[in-house]
Image (cartoon, rainbow, N blue to C red):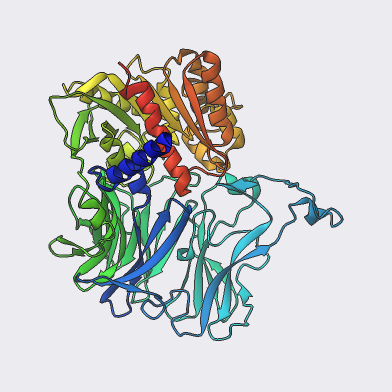
Amino acid sequence: MKKTLLLTLYTFMTTIGFSQSKVMTPEQLIQLNRVSAVGLSDDGKQVIYKTSTFDLKTNERSTKFFTVSVNGGAVKTIEEVGDLVKDKNVSPDGKWKLVAKEVKLQKVSGSDHYEDVPNSNVYIYNQLNYRHWDKWEDGAFSHVFLQSATDSNDKGIDLMEGEPYDCPQQPFGGDEDYIWSPDSKKVLYVTKKLAGTEYAVSTNTNIYEYDLDTKQTVNLTEKNKGYDTHPAFSSKGTLAWLQMKRDGYESDKNDIIVRLPEGYVNLTENWDGTVNGFIWSVDGSKIYFNAPVGGTVHAFEIDVPTGKKKPSKPKQISKGQFDVNGIIGQSGNQLIVNRRDMNHATEIYSLNLKTGAMNQLSKANDDIYKDIKMSNIEKRIVKTTDGKDMVTWVIYPPDFDPTKKYPTLLYCQGGPQGALSQFYSFRWNFQVMAANGYIIVAPNRRGMPGHGVEWNEQISKDYGGQNMKDYLAAIDDIAKESYVDKNKLGCIGASYGGYSVFYLASRHEGRFKSFISHDGIFNWRSMYGTTEELFFVNWDLGGNYWDKTNAAAQKSYAEFNPINFVDKWDTPILIIQGGKDFRVPIGQGLEAFQAAQLRGVKSRLLYFPEENHWVLSAQNSLVWQREFFKWLDETLKNVN
């Protein structure tokens, strides 16, 4: 009875503490409303958006829809969006609609080959691309179908009939991969018409144009050998899309191409940056886009030239310590955009095109944030070992006291060429880390966009080189401050960041007392033998490991391979691995954990059998957060 009473009291006090919490907790983080735009109403006066929320008890997601004026004001809950936002998949003349369907084209399973063994469980492959991201190939491909918009029984016409290629692109493509021409006579779609090994080593997607009258398909981007994606027509009928030039390089400079009467024009060719996404202006005279710049992501505009005029330079519209992480549409002199920072999840804002002023439209999490103490985010410039200025974000605990000493974490970004901007992650969340009493140091090391193309590209084939020196320069710089406890430094990261942790574990020269690596590359040879998108390792490492004449690749597999230096591991390490991660497959985490254990290094394996390169389940995410901080408490924060 006494034990039960104490347990009840403890639960009650914990609940009270949670409800009155003044700093962000993992539970609150996971249950935040996740805002995403549906679009602008047809009259351009309303923003329609949705929020998704996880229920920790049921481990399920619920979705609600809302509308708000582009000028702000009251937010209204709505049941359906069909009457407010035009369906882009319906042709402009209203006669047809586009639908994506799975089509079985190849025999893969045992029962596909042998009808008398329907309960067999076996896959049979004759070529590469047998699995991708977190799914094994089953012989089915996503195709675009043309159907009647009025006849629900119309089975439609397969625009890619018999072709073993995907549209939308797998694994992340959506209906942005297929669009109508303004005259309803043509359909444009994005796909990579390659198979087997050719598919695995190439990034050569193209934009294809299907003519409804002639039933013929034309490749509009045949001459370009890299990515061609996100086609979009202006109100004047001008086509634009995003393009990377080099085949096999997934992080190449992303440019905006427009098809003008005089030919194809690269609007951003002479601009030292890379584009995330774009929309046309309502009148078709400009393009608005967002792009990384100086450790943030902001909105830009660029004029579309007429006649023989050369493209102008892009003009930055938004400025400040936040990200414009998506552009939704234009309404008069306003852009409707997504905005976030390291203290706030994405909300929808209006952006004045003339003044740059911003007005918050959605307020999905304001009631939560109003009671949360925020972290101070400092933009610090660190000198690198080769004399360059490196933007470094420093996140301080709420109620930071410079007279005290704090454990400090070096955050290693993934990608490797992903922008370390003012992002708000629901896993690697700096707000929660700071709320647990840690200072976080997040350097924009070599390999990140937003600091010029040269800075962005330097990392390729130099994985263990200058960028590793950049990491150490950042932690050494902040460690000079009196409020940093130099005896309690940790190093954390995922993907390439996880690789960075494995690599630095053998050459940190005693700086760090704890490491955490999530889905990191530990052994480049086995990584090359089991990862699915081979173009990534071919480009970044320089090629395969058996070609002894390839000096760049041989250096990568020798000098930049963490497994070759595990004999120097002597610091506690937490290793996290997803069972369905085919990008950085399971063997990487298991090899690293086994090596650490056999070396006698304090280590722990956190294994998620059903997760891929990320952690998507709400309850799994909560376990991740609790184990993350439990490990840091054990090995860093509470160690004397």
Q: Is residue 635 visible to the viewer in this orientation of the structure?
A: yes
> For this view, does 353 lie left or right of residue 240?
left
Q: How many tags in the picture?
A: 0
Residue 584, image x, y percentages = 53, 37
Residue 563, image x, y percentages = 52, 21
Q: Is residue 462 visible to the viewer in this orientation of the structure?
A: no
Residue 72, image x, y percentages = 20, 69
Q: Residue furthest front?
A: 1
Rendered position, 569 above or below 370: above
> For this view, does 232 lie left or right of residue 405?
right
Q: In this rendered view, identify the residue nearer to me: 87 or 315.
A: 87
Quarter of the image for residue 146 reads bottom right
Which quadrant, please, contains the N terminus? top left
The residue under the point 41% across, 17% down is 571
The residue under the point 30% across, 44% down is 18
Rendered position, 416 above or below 164: above
Rendered position, 333 above or below 118: below
Q: In this rendered view, identify the residue nearer to me: 531 or 377.
A: 377
